[in-house]
Image: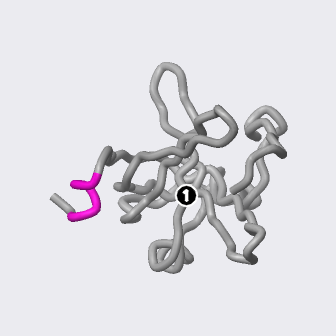
């Protein structure tokens, strides 16, 4: 078991990369979020943040790639609200996507796919 998986909740899963969202923090640091589409009877979108070395390593992934992701689950309390975090510590490409997925523009989804905006979040 990886060292970072010992310090709390950990996860491992796989999904198809739907898009990569990029956000610039107030500090000027760029935060990438991999949005994975997980199939099944009720498909879901799962946002996974990547930082530091892991963010540099995912530079070659493309929309439509099937990714295996492992990492940690966490969260923060801000003004009485708890905000959850899913943070990747390792990302591996385990399959190539379909041509249909490769033609979708990166960072663009339909209006219904986008998460609600909460401007009160300090991070």
From this view, report whether residue 116 is shown above or below residue 74: above
The one of 55 and 120 positioned closer to us in this rendering: 120
Q: Which residue is mark 1?
A: 49
> What residue is drawn where x is 74% and y is 58%?
107
* Residue 74 on image: x %, y %: 45, 46
Residue 44 quadrant = top right
Residue 119 visible from this viewpoint: yes
Q: Residue furthest front?
A: 79
Q: Is residue 6 magenta?
A: yes
Residue 71 quadrant = bottom left
From this view, report whether residue 121 is shown above or below residue 40: below
* Residue 9 on image: x %, y %: 32, 44
Question: What is the chief secondary structure element of the magenta stretch?
Answer: helix
Which contiguous range is marked in magenta? 3-7
* Residue 45 on image: x %, y %: 59, 38
**Which part of the image, by quadrant, shows the N terminus?**
bottom left
Q: Residue furthest top?
A: 41
Q: In terms of secondary structure, where does tag 1 sit?
A: strand
> What residue is drawn where x is 46% and y is 79%?
53
Q: Residue furthest left?
A: 1
The one of 57 and 73 positioned closer to us in this rendering: 73
* Residue 58 on image: x %, y %: 51, 72
**Which part of the image, by quadrant, shows the C terminus?**
bottom right
The one of 15 and 99 positioned closer to us in this rendering: 15
> What residue is drawn where x is 58% and y is 47%?
47
């Amino acid at each position: 078991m990886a060292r970072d998986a010992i310090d709390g909740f950990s996860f491992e899963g796989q999904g198809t990369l739907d898009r990569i969202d990029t956000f610039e923090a107030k500090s000027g640091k760029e935060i990438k979020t991999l949005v994975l589409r997980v199939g099944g009877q009720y498909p879901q979108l799962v946002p996974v943040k990547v930082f530091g070395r892991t963010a540099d390593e995912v530079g070659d992934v493309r929309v439509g790639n099937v990714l295996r992701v492992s990492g940690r689950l966490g969260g923060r309390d801000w003004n009485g609200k708890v905000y959850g975090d899913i943070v990747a510590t390792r990302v591996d490409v385990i399959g190539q996507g379909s041509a249909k997925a490769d033609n979708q523009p990166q960072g663009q989804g339909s209006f219904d796919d986008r998460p609600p905006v909460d401007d009160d979040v300090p991070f």
